[in-house]
Image: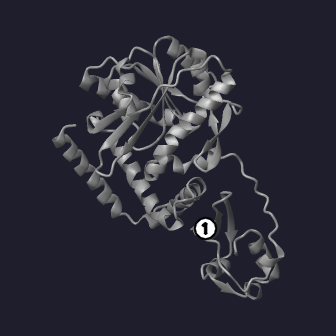
């Protein structure tokens, strides 16, 4: 890594961070809703992180997302990255592989390096990204090829194409590699999921890539990028996972998908502020049971109560007070008077102030504890 280039790069990131520090995020449209979802996901997937650290981690996430956007225009980002792990995997660009990654850190570094190494590969993206960003992606590829004199051929495919797996199978057969972001969780077909354990939750994960590996014989290669405290980037290449034909396709898919998510979970635990997926992972959670168990009679007879800050948050949305349930991702519009009351926790004799029906409902839903 060239020290002069890295110094310029770090300076640019510090300027970017300083600019974001000057923004009053609370006044930004949608900030409170985004933070509520982030906080709920963090509480559900990494409950060991204290609630009072969520706000600072969300601010760091926004900074890292700004860094990632900046990195998209840094053609020499590969020079500002240290490659670790099984580096030998990258040395055979004509041998097809299925590179699997997450939206962590400066995740575009992976495609940048594959282009520079001369890989012919296809990457799949959501339909909206395909529609909105295809032109910019192709422009980036063209500039990379011109700068580094590489013959790399990159194709961007719509992950929601019903025939996407067949198309990718043909790509692999023709000697091309595939780059896929497993945490995007987009694709075609509602039955193409396996349930995997991920951090403290169980989620639905698409099994298209593990199926593809099994039928094509092409190995899956886990790759992850993350940023260090000194602003330098690391790209870690995991051991390839070759398809095991001694087991069924379903067995291989389930076991391998779990191994891949376990691989990425280690890095999320270490760098939670760098994962873009906190903005949408709730869509993959195996639907929780939303029936509230009746609390014991003693729950209605306490001498004092508190608002359940660990489970609920309150914010304003379009001039209306909203109660947000982190456990079930549910929202309830509440009156301004109830909002003001709940924010004055703890409470003495709330049944007298609220009335028995409202008091009992708040206790039943664990809003008052």
Q: Is residue 186 above or below residue 293?
A: above
Residue 1 occupies quadrant: top left
Instruction: Where is residue 346? Give x, y as percent.
Output: 63, 83
- Kindly identify which residue carries mark 1: 310
Q: What residue occupies the far front of the structure in this picture?
A: 246
Q: Is residue 72 above or below residue 162?
A: below
Q: Is residue 194 above or below residue 114?
A: below
- Image side of residue 332 versus residue 214, left or right: right
- Image side of residue 24 versus residue 74, left or right: right
- Image side of residue 302 versus residue 99, left or right: right
Instruction: Where is residue 137? Give x, y as percent.
Output: 40, 31
Q: What residue occupies the far left of the structure in this picture?
A: 4
Between 113 and 131, the one lying in front of the other is 113
Between 304 and 192, the one lying in front of the other is 304
Q: Quadrant of the C terminus?
A: bottom right
Residue 186 visible at all: no
Instruction: Where is residue 164? Give x, y as percent.
Output: 59, 23
Residue 89 occupies quadrant: top left
Question: What residue is drawn where x is 35% and y is 34%?
Answer: 84
Question: What residue is drawn where x is 34% and y is 29%?
Answer: 113
Question: What residue is drawn where x is 52% and y is 18%?
Answer: 218
Residue 205 visible at all: yes
Disc 1: CA contacts within 10 A as few (<14), some (14-19) or many (>=20): some
Circle count: 1
Between 57 and 15, the one lying in front of the other is 57
């Amino acid at each position: 890594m060239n020290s002069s280039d890295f110094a310029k790069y770090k300076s640019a990131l510090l300027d970017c961070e300083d600019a974001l520090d000057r923004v009053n995020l609370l006044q930004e449209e949608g900030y409170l809703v985004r933070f509520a979802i982030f906080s709920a996901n963090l509480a559900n997937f990494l409950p060991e992180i204290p609630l009072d650290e969520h706000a600072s981690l969300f601010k760091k996430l926004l900074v890292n997302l700004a860094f990632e956007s900046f990195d998209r225009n840094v053609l020499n980002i590969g020079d500002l990255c240290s490659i670790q792990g099984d580096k030998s995997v990258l040395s055979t660009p004509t041998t097809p592989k299925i590179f699997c990654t997450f939206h962590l850190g400066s995740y575009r570094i992976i495609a940048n390096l594959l282009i520079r190494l001369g890989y012919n590969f296809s990457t799949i993206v959501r339909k909206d990204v395909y529609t909105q960003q295809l032109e910019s992606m192709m422009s980036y590829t063209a500039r990379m090829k011109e700068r580094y004199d590489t013959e790399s051929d990159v194709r961007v495919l719509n992950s929601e194409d019903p025939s996407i797996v067949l198309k990718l199978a043909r790509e692999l057969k023709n000697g091309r590699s595939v780059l896929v972001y497993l945490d995007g969780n987009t694709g075609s077909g509602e039955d193409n999921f396996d349930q995997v354990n991920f951090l403290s939750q169980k989620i639905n994960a698409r099994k298209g890539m593990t199926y593809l590996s099994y039928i094509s014989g092409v190995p899956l290669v886990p790759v992850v990028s993350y940023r260090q405290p000194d602003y330098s980037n690391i790209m870690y290449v995991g051991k390839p996972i070759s398809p095991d034909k001694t087991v069924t396709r379903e067995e291989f898919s389930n076991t391998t998908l779990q191994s891949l998510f376990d691989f990425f979970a280690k890095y999320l635990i270490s760098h939670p502020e760098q994962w873009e997926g906190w903005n949408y992972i709730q869509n993959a959670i195996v639907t929780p049971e939303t029936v509230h168990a009746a609390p014991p009679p003693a729950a209605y007879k306490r001498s004092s109560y508190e608002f359940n800050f660990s489970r609920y948050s309150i914010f304003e949305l379009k001039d209306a007070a909203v109660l947000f349930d982190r456990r079930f991702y549910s929202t309830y519009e509440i009156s301004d008077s109830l909002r003001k009351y709940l924010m004055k926790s703890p409470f003495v004799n709330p049944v007298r102030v609220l009335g028995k029906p409202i008091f009992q409902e708040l206790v039943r839903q664990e809003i008052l504890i």
